[in-house]
Image (cartoon, grey):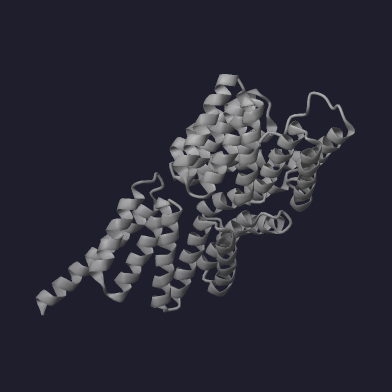
C-alpha cells in the first residue's frame, strides 16, 4: 500500500531512542522484500519504545507495523496497529498522522466489504489533508477513494478521481504515489474496456516499480497487465504475466494477492478446456481465501468450481457452488459477483428444464448488474434470457403444430 514513511524525529536525545528509530527505518526498508523480518523489527522497535516511554518512537513503530500488515494482506492486524496509532496521535495532537491513519483504517474497511465506512474515513482524511495543505496526503486519500469506487464497479467515477490523484503526485514528484495511482488507473481502465490506455498505465507503473525495487507492486502490475491482455483476447500473454506474478508472490508473503492470481490462472485454464488444471488452481485459491477471510476472492473461486462441476455434468454440485458464490458476493457487497452467480444459476436451471426459475434468475441478474458500470454480466444475462424466451417460443410453436 502507498502510505508515507514514518517521518524522522526532530531530535534524538538518548541512545535508546536512536535504537528505536533505526529499527523502524530498517522495518520500513524491508517491508516489501522481507515482510516477516520487517514485522519482527517493527515489533522490536515497539517493545523498546514502550520500555523507554518514547511516544514518538511508539507512533513510528505502530505506523510501520500497520503498513507491513497491509502489505502482507493481514487486515485485522493492520487495523489493530492503526487504531493504537490513532489514539496516540490524538493524544499528541498530530493532525497529519490522524489523517494518514484514517486512510489506513479506510483500507481495512474496504477489505471487509464495508464500503460506506471506508468512503467516510477516506473523505474525512481528504478534508484533513486539504485543511493542512498536505498535497501528497490529499492525493493518497483521493487514490483510495478511487479504490473504493473500483470495488463498487463504478470505474468511470474511479478514473476521474484517480486522474486527479495522479496529477497531484506528478506535481509533487512523488514517484511511489505515481506508481500506485497508475496501478489503480490501469485496473479502472481495464474494467472500462480501454485496453490501450490500461496497457500504457501498466507499463509506466511497472517501470517505476522496477526503478524503486518494489517486487510487491511489480507482481500487482503483472496481474493487471495479464488482465489487459486477457481482455484483448491474448490468453497466452495473459497467462505468462499471471505466472510471473505468481512466482513473485511465493516470496512476498501476501496470501491475498496469491489467491487472486490463482483464480486468474484457473479462469484461463477453464476457458482453454483444461478443467483439471483449473480445478487445482481454483481449489488452492478457495483454501487461501477461506482461511484469510477474503470473501470476494472466495466467491470468484466458488463460481469457477461451479462451472467445472457443471461442465462435468454434476449439476447438483454446480448449483451448490453457484449459491455459495452468490452468498459470498452478497456478504462482500459485490453486485458484479452477485449478478454473475445469478446468471450462472439461471443457465443451470435452464439446462435442468426449470424455465420459470431460469427466467426469474436471469431477471434478477440483470437488475443487480445495472447497479454497476461494468455491463458484461448484464449483457450475458440479457442474452441468456433472450435465448430462453426463444426456446420457449419454439416449444409452444411445436406443441401448437401437434
Please, is residue 93 above or below residue 295 in the view? Answer: above
Q: Nearer the viewer, residue 384 or 99?
A: 99
x, y percentage for residue 227?
A: 55, 52
Q: Quadrant of residue 234?
A: bottom right
Left or right relative to 280: residue 334: left
Left or right relative to 235: residue 39: right
Q: Nearer the viewer, residue 358 or 49?
A: 49
Q: Nearer the viewer, residue 128 or 323?
A: 128
Please, is residue 242 above or below residue 25 in the view? Answer: below
Furthest-right residue in this view: 15
- The structure residue drawn at horizontal position 67% and vertical position 51%, both measured from the top left corner, is 72
- The structure residue drawn at horizontal position 82% and vertical position 40%, both measured from the top left corner, is 23
x, y percentage for residue 347?
A: 34, 67
x, y percentage for residue 153?
A: 44, 45
Left or right relative to 281: residue 339: left
Is residue 192 in sight in this rendering?
no
Q: Quadrant of residue 54?
A: top right
Amino acid at each position: 500500500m502507498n502510505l508515507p514513511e514514518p517521518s524522522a524525529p526532530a531530535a534524538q536525545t538518548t541512545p535508546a531512542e536512536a535504537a528505536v528509530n533505526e529499527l523502524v527505518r530498517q522495518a520500513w526498508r524491508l517491508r516489501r522484500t522481507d515482510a516477516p523480518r520487517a514485522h519482527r523489527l517493527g515489533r522490536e522497535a515497539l517493545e523498546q519504545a514502550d520500555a523507554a516511554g518514547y511516544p514518538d518512537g511508539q507512533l513510528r513503530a505502530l505506523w510501520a507495523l500497520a503498513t507491513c500488515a497491509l502489505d502482507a494482506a493481514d487486515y485485522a492486524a493492520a487495523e489493530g496497529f492503526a487504531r493504537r496509532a490513532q489514539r496516540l496521535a490524538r493524544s499528541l495532537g498530530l493532525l497529519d498522522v490522524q489523517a494518514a491513519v484514517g486512510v489506513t483504517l479506510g483500507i481495512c474497511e474496504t477489505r471487509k466489504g464495508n464500503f460506506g465506512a471506508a468512503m467516510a474515513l477516506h473523505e474525512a482524511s481528504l478534508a484533513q489533508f486539504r485543511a493542512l495543505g498536505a498535497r501528497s496526503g490529499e492525493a493518497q486519500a483521493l487514490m483510495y477513494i478511487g479504490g473504493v469506487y473500483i470495488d463498487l464497479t463504478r470505474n468511470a467515477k474511479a478514473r476521474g478521481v484517480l486522474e486527479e490523484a495522479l496529477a497531484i503526485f506528478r506535481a509533487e514528484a512523488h514517484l511511489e504515489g505515481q506508481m500506485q495511482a497508475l496501478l489503480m488507473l490501469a485496473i479502472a481502465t481495464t474494467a472500462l474496456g480501454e485496453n490501450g490506455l490500461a496497457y500504457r498505465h501498466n507499463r509506466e507503473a511497472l517501470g517505476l516499480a522496477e526503478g524503486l525495487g518494489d517486487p510487491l507492486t511489480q507482481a500487482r502490475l503483472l496481474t493487471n497487465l495479464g488482465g489487459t491482455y486477457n481482455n484483448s483476447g491474448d490468453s497466452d500473454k495473459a497467462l505468462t504475466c499471471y505466472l510471473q506474478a505468481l512466482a513473485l508472490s511465493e516470496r512476498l508473503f501476501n496470501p491475498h494477492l496469491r489467491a487472486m492470481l490463482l483464480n486468474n490462472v484457473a479462469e484461463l485454464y477453464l476457458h482453454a478446456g483444461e478443467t483439471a488444471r483449473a480445478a487445482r488452481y481454483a481449489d488452492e485459491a478457495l483454501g487461501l481465501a477461506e482461511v484469510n477471510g477474503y470473501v470476494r476472492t472466495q466467491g470468484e473461486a466458488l463460481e469457477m468450481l461451479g462451472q467445472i462441476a457443471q461442465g462435468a455434468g454434476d449439476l447438483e454440485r454446480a448449483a451448490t457452488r453457484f449459491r455459495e458464490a452468490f452468498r459470498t458476493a452478497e456478504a462482500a457487497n459485490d453486485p458484479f459477483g452477485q449478478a454473475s452467480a445469478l446468471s450462472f444459476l439461471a443457465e443451470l436451471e435452464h439446462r435442468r428444464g426449470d424455465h420459470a426459475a431460469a427466467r426469474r434468475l436471469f431477471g434478477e441478474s440483470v437488475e443487480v448488474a445495472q447497479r454497476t458500470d461494468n455491463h458484461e454480466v448484464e449483457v450475458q444475462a440479457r442474452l441468456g434470457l433472450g435465448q430462453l424466451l426463444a426456446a420457449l417460443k419454439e416449444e409452444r410453436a411445436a406443441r401448437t403444430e401437434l
